[in-house]
Image: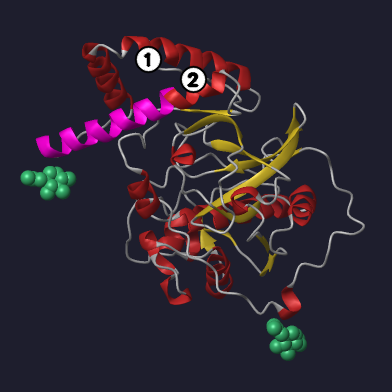
Amino acid sequence: MCSCNVTGSAFFHYRMHIVCALLLLDCLVLAQSSSALNKMWDEWKIKHRKVYDNQTEVVFRRAVWEKNVQLVLRHNQEASAGKHSFTMGLNHLADMTSEEVNEKLNGLKLEEPFNFGNDTFKGVNGLSIPQNVDWRKDGLVSPVMNQGLCGSCWAFSSMGALEGQMKKRTGVLVQLSPQNLVDCSTSEGNLGCRGGYISKSFSYVIRNGGVDSESSYPYEHKNGKCRYSVKGKAGYCSDFHILPKGDEKALQAVVGSVGPVSVAINAMLPSFHLYRGGLYNVPNCNPRFINHAVLVVGYGTDRGEDFWLVKNSWGTAWGEEGFVRIARNKKNLCGIASFGVYPTV
Ligand SMILES: *[C@@H]1O[C@H](CO)[C@@H](O)[C@H](O)[C@H]1NC(C)=O
Ligand SMILES: *[C@@H]1O[C@H](CO)[C@@H](O)[C@H](O)[C@H]1NC(C)=O
């Protein structure tokens, strides 16, 4: 009774989230009794298939989870009082500290300043920029995956951008293989589950002459031996382009006219780890602290608030069925326009 599922297209479900927040408030009252809290814990563990190795681990995870329960309940109480534009939830990361999430899931390496020379973004003048874009509706966005406890966000982000361009070129959306990147792009400077770079992912696909499909080279949540096979090849890349740093208008122009764009963001805050739905507008989401790669798949305006529509790789139990709406035109909030990259095929 304390779980709160919003199904269907999660795009305009802010109202539902308020209802959820109120449901959770009821739970807060119940949670005063420890038996109710025990019940919530048991239900949460079943829902997220949690099994712990030993009793020490159980005690530690329960303590972390309880802290997160308090955090989520307090936040949602404030959200229902109008103090926040988004809700938080007890997703599969709720038994991890934010330090652990940042260490284990946010494996984006900071790109060195590039000498882009000939490869710079050519400017946005003359492009007609739509007011709203959602590339999911055009079939350019594959299903949300869960990277697990592996810092491979960079591979999911870059393959997501390439999937969109391949779909535009071939008319078919084929999910590409982040595992191919995790296992095979070490000579480009990527470190598998210990992290990597968006740009070096495209460099790998260019050098390798292609990348396999997800179905021929499935994701494994861990480093493995390189098993690229040309028989499974489903994507290729000829070049990639870096957007001007911090320019949300340029990002909008490219997302609107080209397709999904790989970006780097600050995903360090507990409010992001336990984000449930709504407009992620957190003024202290510093654009200089970037640690996670995601995919911008659209943008729009909801009730006068501009947002970026962003695909994450933390499974569908996180956020709005795996997506997050991040506040747009708020001085590059979370660094969303600090490092945008898109491939050409
Ligand atoms: C309990 O499990 C944790 C996590 O798997 C592990 O790190 C720890 O060493 C284990 N402790 C004992 C006493 O087995
Ligand atoms: C730009 O293009 C020229 C000619 O194609 C090439 O010689 C030069 O190395 C390129 N510069 C960069 C930074 O890629």
SS at circle 1: helix
Name the mark on residue 77. Answer: 2
Characterize the magenta stretch by its predominant secondary structure.
helix
Quarter of the image for the C terminus: give it: bottom right
Q: Magenta includes 70?
A: yes
279, above or below 162, in the image: above
- Residue at x 47%, y 42% (from the top left corner): 145
Q: Magenta includes 185?
A: no
23, above or below 117, in the image: above
In the figure, residue 55 lies in which quadrant?
A: top left
Q: Nearer the viewer, residue 235 or 342?
A: 342
SS at circle 2: helix
Give, as a three-letter code, the residue at label 2: Gln
Give, as a three-letter code, the residue at label 1: Leu
Extent of the magenta region:
55-73
Disc 2 residue lies near ligand 1 with CB under 8 A: no
* Residue position for label 1: 28
